[in-house]
Amino acid sequence: METTPKSPEAPAAAKPKNKMALIGIVIIVLIVVGVGAYYLFNGGTTTPGTPITIWDTNGACLQTASPPNCGFKTSTGSTTLNVTSGTKVTWTNTGGAPHTATSCDPAQVTTYGTTACPTTNVSTLDAFDSHSLQAATGSYSFTFSKTGSYHYFCTIHVWMHGIVNVQ
């Protein structure tokens, strides 16, 4: 019996399918690695955190105003927020003037005096500083990982104070 030799083109036709499958697998791996890296470097969350509003009256923030025309406030209207360790807090400036949320660490007392930071934080607590937050839209987040009372103020309006108690 005579056998018909196989066409040499048949194995060549199978290679492009294998090559396409390999390219598909590489693309999927890159997507998975990219998503994993995004969550790793961005904390895996896009939640805004527990809110604190920085407010003022149409950009006015006078130390002598009575009642006060600027400050920090929680959702209950208080200047003190109580949270548990690991909580992310987000300050949002809704006022018409720039403001900051800056921890009262010893360096800030040296720079701004005790008027700015009437109570300094203990040296074991992490310091934070939002720098200047744009009027009406600026926001800053900080995750509190250590228990304690964090006193903070606005470096632009040093009479504005708040406290975050972390349990």
Image (cartoon, grey):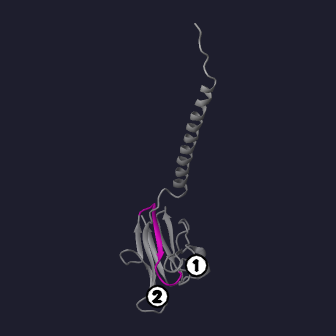
Label 2 crowd bin: few (<14), some (14–19), many (20+), radius 10 Å: some
- Quadrant location of the N terminus in the rendered image: top right
What's the distance in space between the residues labelled 2 and 1, CA to CA? Answer: 29 Å
Above or below 44: residue 109: below
> What amino acid does circle 1 point to?
Val
**Residue 92 image offset from top left, x and y in percent:** 47, 74
Task: Report the front residue among 149 and 138.
Answer: 138
Q: Earlier in the sequence, mark 2 or mark 1?
A: 2
Above or below 6: residue 97: below
Task: Report the front residue among 76 and 133.
Answer: 133
Q: Is residue 17 magenta?
A: no
Above or below 100: residue 15: above
* Residue lying at 58% horizontally and 41% vertically, measured from the top left: 23
For label 1, the SS is helix
Residue lying farthest to the top in this orientation: 1
Kindly identify which residue carries mark 2.
Answer: 58
* Residue lying at 52% horizontally and 51% vertically, measured from the top left: 35
Above or below 165: residue 36: above
* Residue lying at 54% horizontally and 65% vertically, measured from the top left: 124
**Residue 31 image offset from top left, x and y in percent:** 54, 48
Q: Is residue 86 magenta?
A: yes
**Residue 73 image offset from top left, x and y in percent:** 41, 78
Residue lying farthest to the left in this orientation: 76
**Which label sits on residue 109?**
1
Task: Report the front residue among 151 and 135.
Answer: 135
Label 1 crowd bin: few (<14), some (14–19), many (20+), radius 10 Å: some
Q: Which residues are magenta?
A: 84-98
> What amino acid does circle 2 point to?
Asn
